[in-house]
Image: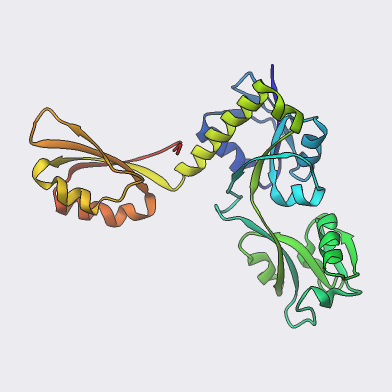
Amino acid sequence: MKLRLGLPKGSLQDATLAMFQKAGYEFQVNSRSYAPTADDEELDPLLLRPQEIPRYVEAGILDAGLTGKDWIVDNGSDIVEVAKLVYSKRTRRPVRIVLAAANGSDINCVRDLEGKRISTEYVRMTERWLAENGVKADVEFSWGACEAKVPELADAIVVNTETGSSLVAHNLCIVETLLESQTMLIANKDAWTDDWKRRKIENLSMLLTGALNAQSLVGLKMNVPRAALADVTQVLPALKKPTLSPLSDDDWVAVETVIEEKVVRDLIPKLRRAGAQGIVEYPLNKVIY
């Protein structure tokens, strides 16, 4: 049996394949093919635009897939949301779907869109949002590069933004946020009721989440004299209490823990001054809570 898995092609592709690699899965991608090969014979992967994946998962053409929350909402797809995987092409922050207009324009809220032209890839989401707010506007589909269409071709745009730098570069400002979005692992409802497929999807979810958890963490181990153990553990942050192991010399203890990578540069000198020796920092692939 195989699990038909949709992977996002485009800007998220490299970040997604790197995350799968840390989770233990290798995909070989041919630039001319949309069907990568996987080192797991139980996976049947397919590269697709993330905009399409929710529709194919809902229809049962795919058993599961990775796509943005924004595209699930835009498509109105009836699927199972298995896990949030907070990563993107640049950062680990969610992206925002925003209404943006030119700096100094008369568009300062959703009501100011009455009778205006809006350019977006998120046509259905935008139309529903306008209807919810009682606003009538002309929503036009754009294949991208929405920022360049204001003000000559559109009065405003609805786009996703991660850092906001592209909006600033085009003299645009964010007026309102429609949605915060992150990558989601989703499943077809029938596949979710199949015991084998559900277990396979849950395994993927566990390992991918573990790989993301590990991105900001490192392992730290050191040797500590028993006389200095209290001083060392006092300055040592940890997910839980550190692991202590006896050494061949009864006067020493091996200490091992997992910590946030961003604190290591300040922590190591403190540990050394507290009496720790042989301090080793090492990367992590997965952390399962």
What residue is shown at x 13% (from left), y 48% (from top)?
275
Q: 286 or 147: nearer the eye? A: 286
Above or below: residue 70 compared with residue 175: above
Residue 267 falls in image quadrant: bottom left
What residue is shown at x 61% (from left), y 29% (from top)?
27
Could you tell me if residue 186 is visible in this image? yes
Most distant residue in the top direction? 1
Residue 47 falls in image quadrant: top right
Above or below: residue 86 compared with residue 34: below
Q: 125 or 50: nearer the eye? A: 125
What residue is shown at x 37% (from left), y 44% (from top)?
218
Say left or right for 276 vs 164.
Answer: left
Could you tell me if residue 33 is visible in this image? no
What residue is shown at x 64% (from left), y 50% (from top)?
182
Say left or right for 4 vs 87.
Answer: right
Report x, y in % for residue 148: 78, 67
Report x, y in % for residue 29: 66, 31
